[in-house]
Amino acid sequence: MVFLGTAGIFLGIISSSFYWMLISWGQYYNPLFPFFNHFFHSQAIPSLKLFYGNLLPKNLIEAVFFPFYFSFTKNPGWGFSDYRYPFVFVLFIIAALTGRKIKKQALEVKWLYLLLICSYFIWEYSFAVPRYLAPLEMLVPLVIYLLLHQLTKNTFDCLVLTFMIFYTIAFMMVPIHMVRAPWYEASFFNVKLPDFIAKTPKATVLLAYSAYTLSVDPRPLSYLIPFFPPEWRIIGIPFVDEKFILSNEEQQKMSSLINKNSANFYLLTMERNMRELYRAGKELGLSSYGQCEYIYDDRQRMTHEKTLICPVTKCPGSICTRI
């Protein structure tokens, strides 16, 4: 039975994910890219373990009672209340303590319980990100009903308790708060570019971006790209911990692209990240060439940060002076 259950899980993974895992392996040599790269060592990103330190349990007590922590506390990383997990936690404890009909449960139900428990612990240990719980959110109500059916003596009691629990979950659920800007006008961003951009038909821009989505440094600025003239080209410079990071292969490829272009060159990032982007430009054979100008949009009105676009030029010969 154990062999059949394990084989079923393996077959499920293969049938649902094998194709994309194969594609990921072919492109990045990591079937789970970008996760677990500390094990697979893909050259596409640094070989670091991705984790969300601000969301993971801080100690053993918090780890054991984690469903209660993210349902009752005001941790800004979670930002939601969902009581289905405390309910299923308590029902599992009651079922384990009473031992009621556990051995009489169908094998499929036992495997469903095991799937939920193992998936939850993997999520809690590795991520603890609310949106990653979406598959379990659909599974938990079914498990709650099955546990109630196991613990109650008749169908009527089971249905009444199920209704009461589901109603309580729905009534007390608080979704994640999304920030909305009330001042939208012609577009969602109201981007105002410097005047020189419209007068410059061609240019190449080095844009700083975070190598990991879990990091907001530098702030994502890709939403600005559609507002530039169509002949402008954007080259992304990955940052990790507010420092640019380029492999030798990436640096050679970017230097080749820069050498092939004789148009104007610019650096684009937040004001506090510009010095580091200048340093990246120097490594790629570019040096400062004039004053920076500001780009304005509604996103900055919410975060109170300034976006700069700064002109640079190819270094004479192969020597760049210090920026």
Image (cartoon, rainbow, N blue to C red):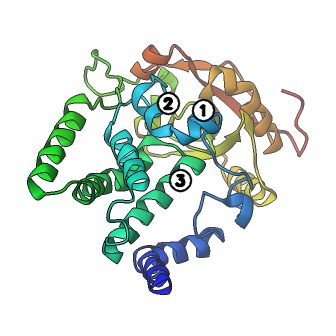
Helix, strand or loop at mark 1: loop
Residue that label 1 marks: 54
Measure the C-alpha gap from mark 2 to mark 3: 19 Å
Q: Quadrant of the N terminus?
A: bottom left
Helix, strand or loop at mark 2: loop
The numbered dot on residue 281 is: none
Q: Quadrant of the C terminus?
A: top right
Horizontal and vertical percent position of residue 220: 53, 35
Horizontal and vertical percent position of residue 256: 73, 57
Q: Nearer the viewer, mark 3 or mark 1?
A: 3
From the viewer's perspective, is residue 148 above or below residue 180?
A: below
Horizontal and vertical percent position of residue 131: 41, 45
Q: Residue at x 53, y 73 (%)?
A: 21
- Binning the other alpha carbons within 10 Å of mark 1 as few (below 14), some (14 to 19) or many (20 upward) gives few
Q: Is residue 41 visible?
A: no
Of 22 and 288, which appears nearest the observer?
A: 22
Q: Residue at x 88, y 36 (%)?
A: 320
Residue that label 3 marks: 121
